Amino acid sequence: MGVRDDIVAYCRRQLGCAYSYTPSGGVEGRSYNCSFLSTRAFKAAGLTIPGWQGHQNGDGSQSDWVYRAGHWTTDKSKLKPGDLVFFGTSRRNTGHVGIVSRSGSTPYIIDSTPSRGVAERLLPTAAGFVGGGWPLKSLPADATKDDGFGVKKRVTVRSDFLRVRDAPSTKTGKVVMSGGKEVRYSKGESVTIDSVVIGDDGYAWGHYIGASSGKDRYIALGMLENAR
């Protein structure tokens, strides 16, 4: 496993932990604010970064480190697992940080928020995304394993008529159609997934690539507490 893998793996182990309102930033393994999660994730990979995500450029914050290292980008497709992403009104005025968990045209991040605690979700570009990148001057090698859990896992469907969606959400994910019919699995059928994503609806979603379409596909595995 590479450094990027170690950072993402740490974040995944904290999924479901509560948000922390304490000045210390939280208690490892139990609660986190956004900066505490990113700081501890990098420490788990043997790296040290500032303990605060930062409000103003030039204050030695995490966002300042990304910019000064020369890796700042607003191009979502250039972000890689382990990169930090920031939210606010501008690069010089940020109020939240997350960690990229899966790259792509629309990456996934793991962050800690008051409403969700530590969770994985699509990078919410409409929520004030201002950019991000790697906070150290030296760039690590790319992730060496499959983003996500890194293994293929065959799961058996436990519900009747489980619809396949194009995004991990019952709110925004569209039901996939083929030949004018919904693509779905029946109870007892099996499907091989390559990762698990926590949606904005509280469900854990299994991800796979559609054999004929080559596109992302998701099936609901159950509520978070029942799916892990």
Image (cartoon, rainbow, N blue to C red):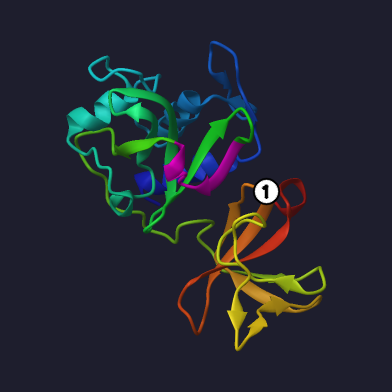
Asked if residue 14 can be seen in this view, the reply is no
Q: Position of residue 84 (x, y in %)?
A: 37, 37
Q: Amino acid at mark 1?
A: Asp
Q: Residue at x 26, y 26 (%)?
A: 65
Whether 225 is among the magenta residues is no
The residue beneath circle 1 is: 201
Using the image, determine if residue 90 lies above or below residue 195: above
Q: Relative to 198, is 150 on the left or the right? A: left
Q: Position of residue 88 (x, y in %)?
A: 39, 28
Using the image, determine if residue 142 lies above or below residue 16: below
Residue 151 or residue 83, whichever sits in front: 83
Q: Which residues are magenta?
A: 118-127
Residue 164 or residue 79, whichever sits in front: 164
The quadrant holding residue 42 is: top left
Crowdedness of circle 1 by 10 Å Cα count: few (<14), some, many (20+)?
some
Asked if residue 56 can be seen in this view, the reply is yes
Q: Tag 1's secondary structure?
A: loop
Q: Residue at x 62, y 47 (%)?
A: 200
Q: Position of residue 190 (x, y in %)?
A: 71, 77
Using the image, determine if residue 157 lies above or below residue 211: above
Whether 123 is among the magenta residues is yes
Using the image, determine if residue 20 lies above or below residue 198: above
Q: Residue at x 27, y 14 (%)?
A: 59
Residue 42 or residue 196, whichever sits in front: 196
Q: Residue furthest bottom?
A: 179
Count numbered badges in the picture: 1
Q: Residue furthest top?
A: 23
Q: Position of residue 27 (x, y in %)?
A: 60, 21
The quadrant holding residue 208 is: bottom right
